Every structure is written in C-alpha cells, then in structure tokens.
Amino acid sequence: MAIPATSLSRPVPRQPAWQTTAIRAVPFAVALAAWWLATSPWGGLPRYVLPSPGAVLDNALELYAKGTLVSAILSSIGRMLLGFAFGSVLGVGLGILVGTNRAVAAFFMPLARFFQAVAGVIWIPLAVLWFGLSWKSVTFIIFNTVFFLVFYNTLMGVQTVPRTLANSILTLGGSRWDVIWEALIPGALPGILVGLRVGVGYGWRSLIAAEIIASGQGLGVLIWEGQRLFRIPDIILGLFLIGLISLTMDKLVFAPLQARTIERWGTSARAPQ
Amino acid sequence: MADSRAIHRHDHTAREAVLPEDAAKILFDGVTFEYIDAQTGERLRAIDGLTAQIRENEFFCILGPSGCGKSTLLYLVAGLLKPTQGKILVGGRVVKGPGADRGLVFQEYALLPWRTVRENVALGLKIRGVSREERDAVARRFIHLVGLDGFERKYPHELSGGMRQRVAVARTLANSPDVMLMDEPFAAVDAQTRAVLQEELTRIWAQSRLTVVFVTHNVDEAIFLGDRVLIMTPRPARVHSVIPIDIPREERSWAHLDRDPRFAALRGRIGDVMRNLGDGSASNHDRG
Amino acid sequence: MTAASAVYYRLAMGLAERPWLAALFRNLGPFVPLIAAWQIVVLLRIWPRSFLPAPAAVPQAFAFLVTESDLPGQVLRTIYRVTAGGLAGLGLGVLLGAMVGTSRGLHEALRGLIDYLQAVGEIGWLPLFIIWSGFNDRTIILTVAYTVFFPVFFGTMAGILAVPRTLANSVLTLGGGRRHVLWEVLLPGALPAIITGFRVGMGFGWRTVILAEMLIAQLGLGVMMFEARSFFRVDWILVGMVVAGVLWLVTDRFVLLPLESKTIQRWGVQVVER
C-alpha cells in the first residue's frame, strides 16, 4: 500500500536499498548488543532468566549436528504446506463458487462469518478428539484456519466486484466462464490475497499451537519442551526460527504478489477481518 | 500609460516605485526556494530571487500559470516552508515559522472532518486557550458574517464546497490575523457560487481592513478582487509585472463589471500576457 | 440449491418491514440447514455418538455446564483476561504507533524489527513468558496484549500517515504547535483506522486467550474445553466453541463495528488504504 507523504515530514529522496537495509538492521544490532551485555558478567542477568547469545548459538549448532533441528523445521514446514495447500485451494474455489450468485452468497455470509471467527486454535480440543495426538490434528488445524479465512475474504472480495464489469463482459459476447475468469477472479484478487496473507500468518501461528498440544515433533514441540524442561536456549532458537520462517513466507511470496497485482492495478482490499 | 509598458517588460526591470521598508506589510526580499524532487532526487528551483512588496490593508492578488509556484509563495509567507535564499518580512519581522498572525485559507478547505462547523471556526481560539463561552460567541459572530447561521452543528462533509470554504474563511478570520493568505480558495466551487463568494469576500474585507494575499490562476477573479495584481512567470517563478487595478471598489459587482470597458481592457491585456507566458516561456527566458 | 436459496432470499427481503426481525432471520436462518444436515449425519450413524453427538446434545450440555460447572464464572474469567490484555495492547499500540507514525526516522529504523516481532507471534513467546512470569493471569494477559498490539500499532501508524497534510498545516497556521497537531489532527484522523486495528486484534486476541488458557490456566473457557477432551465430551467442547464464537461476534457486531461506522459516517472520513 502506497502511503501518502506525511504531514510532519517533508518528502525526501528515495534512498538506495542497502541504506534502508542498514538502517533497519540497527535495532536488531542494538537488541543483540543489549542481550549480550545483559547476560555478560557486567550485566549479571542469570542464565535461568536469559542465557547468553553464545550459549544459544552453541545449542543451535549442537541440535543441528544431532539432526533434530532440521527435522523439526522440515516437519513444521511440511505440515504448513500441506494444510495451506488444501485450505487455500478449497477456500478460493468455494468462495468464488458461492460468491457468483448473490442469493447464495447472502445465505452463506453469516455461516462464513461465524466459522471465520472461530477458525484456528479454538478447534484444537475437537481436532485432538477426532484425529488423536498426531500430524493429522495439526494439519487439520492449519487447514481449518486457512480455509475459513480465505473463504470469507474471497466471498467478500467477489461481492465487491462491480456488476457492470460482469455485464460488460456478457455484452462483449463472453460466457459465464469468461465472467468468472476475466472479472470476478481479478476483481476479487485483493480480497483473496488479503485472505491468503492473513491465512499464512495466522495459520503458521496455529500450527505452532497445534504442535504444542497435539504432536511429537516440530518447532512448537521444540519451544514447549524447552519450557517444560527449562531449556531456554531451545526456546530462543525456536522463537527465532518461527519468526524468520513466517517473515520469509510473507515478504518473499505474498508481499511481491500483492505489489505486482493490486497495487499496480490501483485496486485495494478492505481491512482483513 | 506607465502600466502598459510595465506589462511587457521582464521581472528584473519591472520594479514598481520602491516603498520605504517599514511601509510594506509584507516584503519579499530576493526570495528563492529550491526543493529536492522525491522521485528523481533532482534539485529543483521553484522561485527565483523574487522581490515584491505588499501594503497594509491591501487586497493583493498573485496571478500565474498553474504549477508556477504561487502556492509555494503563500506557504513561505505562512511559514510552512522556508526560503532557500532571501527573506520574507511581515510587519517588519522576519518569518521564521507558522503563526496565528498569518492565517491561511487552503484550496482544499482543510477543515477538520471530526469537528462541527462551530468547533472548526473556534479552533484557533481553542488553541490559544480561550474559554469555551468566549469561543462560542466569537464563532457565532463569524459564522453569521459568512452567512452560515443554522449550520453550527453540521460536520464539514454535510456541507457543499462553497459552504465549506465559507467555514474556512470564518475560521481564519475568527483567529483575528493581520494577514489573510488565500490559496485559490474558490477553484473547486462552481462558477455561480464562485461569483457570490467573491462579492462576499470583498464585503468582508472592506469591513475588516485586513491585508489579503490572494493566489489565483483566474484573470477575471484577480481583476475583480485585487487592488493590485502581481503576474508571475512560469517556473522558476519571478515577478513579471505588478498591475494596479484602477476600478473603484463601489463599482465592482459582477452585474456591473461585465459591461465595463476598463474591466474588458484589463482582462484583454492581462490575458495576452498570460497566454504569452504560457506558450513561449522557454524562449522568453533565453532572451532574458 | 440455487432455486431454494432464491426463495429464501426473497423471504428475507420480505421481512424488510421489521428490520430487527429480518436481521435475525438473515443471520440465524442459514444455521438451520447446517444443523439439519448435522442431525442427518448423526442419524446415519457414520460415527459413534461420542465422536459426533446430536445437535440437541449441545444445549443440554450447555444447561448442565451452567448449573453444575459454573460456566458463567469461567467465561467471566476469560472475558476479564481478554479485556485486560486487549486494553493493554490497545494503549501500547496507539502510543508506539503514534510515535512511529509521526517520525520518519523512527519509522525507517523500527519497521524491520516490528515486522519481525509480529512474525514471531504470541505463541512463539508464550514459553518464555511462562518462564519469566509464571503460570498465572499475568502471563495470559501479556500474551493477549502481544496479539492485539500489532494490528493496533499498524492501524495507528497507517492512519496517521494517511491524514492529509493540509489538515496539520491548517492547525499550524492557526498558531498551533506539534501537540495541537497530534491531538486535533493526527489522532482523531487515525481513529477509524485505530478502531479497525483493534477489531482485527481482538478477533485474534479472543482466540489467543482461549489457547493460552488451554496451555496454562486452571480456570476459564479454554480450560473447560481442554478438560472436556480428557473426559471425551465432544458436546462440552462444542458448547465452548459456540460460546466463544457467539460472544466474540456479539461484541464485534454490537460494540466495535457500530463504534467504527459511527466515526466513519459522522465524520464522513474513510479508513484510508490507498
């Protein structure tokens, strides 16, 4: 989203990318330095409150050497992809199918709103009863989170497409299929992308939560076992990776996708619900 | 006769008789303004060594092609921007930043959407810490002055463009400034409303005897309103000429002026200048 | 399906003369076929009752939980936690959002760190919060505040950045200072976006509180749902889900949404997303 010039700051020339990166790296460096200082002999923060950066790094290397780290990451990402793939495809498909007819859409709207509101971690107890303490529960939770968020936002998106667009395609001799392909999907894309983006962010957090409760491996298990067994370096490592993977998914996949479509077209989405 | 010669001269020669510095309400002293273009990073000059004087209680119009830096000049007087070189004196003091002595009426009204008409008009007084009763009384007076009685409790979005601009004028006047700066205030309203607003503005100005600096790109508007009209060159802006409008105030009404030969003559002359500036500006500069 | 729903749609429109009733019908009507389908599935005996109880079991379980198990008390505890956490997140979000929104330097510098902290999420921090703060309400409230903070922060920041520059200029030319610009222009201008951010944040915060309760509390809606699991009471879990969903939708639709549309309509301003 292009942000208009602010009221208090004058327009400044666009700075080179490396400069932006450098400026943004400063707070991380400051945080790292503060952490290092606080846990050093001068800071005196005890290990059972916060271990030093070095201890966390040593622990990370050790887990890497044992192979547990890589398998935890792969297991989490694998379930994420599985659940996300099913949830997003079904969410977009059903959202467009339901959204094309106004009466059908009006009927489904309250249902979509309700299930969107409870999507995600609230389903964990039910998932555990239905699918047991296994990867199936975890995958179901991600699927559930992504599906309802994407479905709801697609449905909203389709309904905001102006009817004149559909009519214009019909008067050009287009079929119903052309209307869906040329007007409804591109028109609903801002909503769809918001749904996917929120879905992937929230789905990832739901995954961690579901892993904590329902499964024997993954990053969620790493941090929760760390809490139970008081292994703080494990928690910090997991926390770091959870943020890194989530940010990578968002910035490398969804942000460019949004920039390339809706920002270029000058359309935009409503706020995510 | 002297005027017609001035029109065809260039900025650095077209100096009016220089007033003693303390007689000028506003003095532009070699004002240059440069800024850095946000897209290209280039350094651009919007105003180039502009010198001019505006008298106390004068209705002073600044006329120029669109995008020539007229608004920038007003923002400099208001103190929202700072000159790169030169200085601006208002009432003998150098402008250092924005202040209540120089009220600005914006082209896009700039009313606070979350404040009612009354609250918008009273905003300046509220900022100065005036009590609520006094604020309301002053606001009521100025709302009456601009003919908006009964609209005190409305929000800006419930008003037409013309009404919003009346509120903006009332808000500026209620703050009792020495100078009222107006940035194409009637550009966004329809022609009929504009004519009415111009006549009312003249009436209000006659009552208050403020110094008004009025920026416009509309030749008729400048002649109708101004005591004098300053014509600016295209970018970088300089003074092309300053033209006194010698039509007596009591004869300035649209009903009358449309058939007035002096009005037609001024309009023809200034119109010609503006057309020349608009078309052959680049070659003019080369020769200058 | 289409024909039936067209009839339904017309029926809903026909109720337009009594808007309140019509709204009720429009919003609750669609649940009737859903519940009917559920009943049919139960009657077909595809799964055992303990896996999927009949719809009628849910109100029964609700009555039982209210009378025998102090469900209202548990729910109140959850509401307390989510409200406290939500308000803390709101306050902090507005404060930092206003700081970052009014200073280009801060905005440039902190953008990356804040994006990263949002990506880590409240659940990533939960184990550390527990170690630092213990198994108590404070930890739950902290977790909820963390969830609510980010949407409020981004709403405040984007809202402030979207306020037209001339409004701030107008206050300056009336003799106002930075403080007046903040209070008269920037914060009111950002208010619709702040409320939108708060709505989004509380939507997630409401789920966070239930999750946090499942993991660390002894009392609350999440605890009730999680313990039902060990007794194999799907009906209790369903009660919890319905209560959670209904409570949130009621809060959102009857409190937060009207608040949002009131500022937007009365002021004629939009949540700017250019």
Image (spheres, helix red, strand yellow):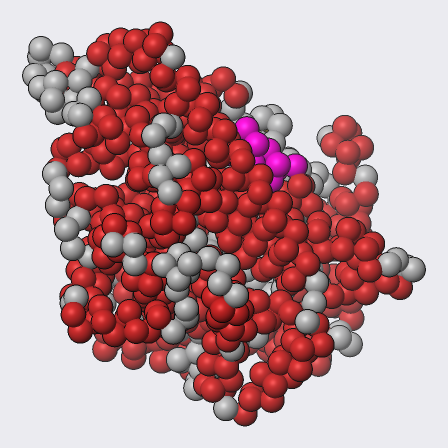
Furthest toward the right, the residue is A173
Q: Is residue A182 above or below residue B178?
A: above
Magenta span main SS: helix
Q: Is residue B195 above or below residue A253?
A: below
Magenta segment: does it hold B80?
Answer: no
Seen at 88% across and 58% down, the residue is A174
C17 sits to left or right of A233: right
**Residue A211 position within the rendered picture, expressed as x and y whole percent measured from the top left:** 36, 36
Q: Is residue C213 visible?
A: yes
Task: Compare residues B61 and A116 and report the one nearer the observer.
Answer: A116
Quadrant where the image shows the C terminus of chain B: top right
**Residue B244 position within the rendered picture, expressed as x and y whole percent measured from the top left:** 63, 58
Furthest toward the bottom, the residue is C17
**Residue A98 position within the rendered picture, expressed as x and y whole percent measured from the top left:** 65, 62
Seen at 34% across and 69% down, the residue is C58
**Residue B108 position within the rendered picture, expressed as x and y whole percent measured from the top left:** 55, 60
**Residue range of the region highlighted in magenta in the rendering:** A250-260
Quadrant where the image shows the N terminus of chain B: bottom right
Task: Compare residues B142 and A250 and report the one nearer the observer.
Answer: A250
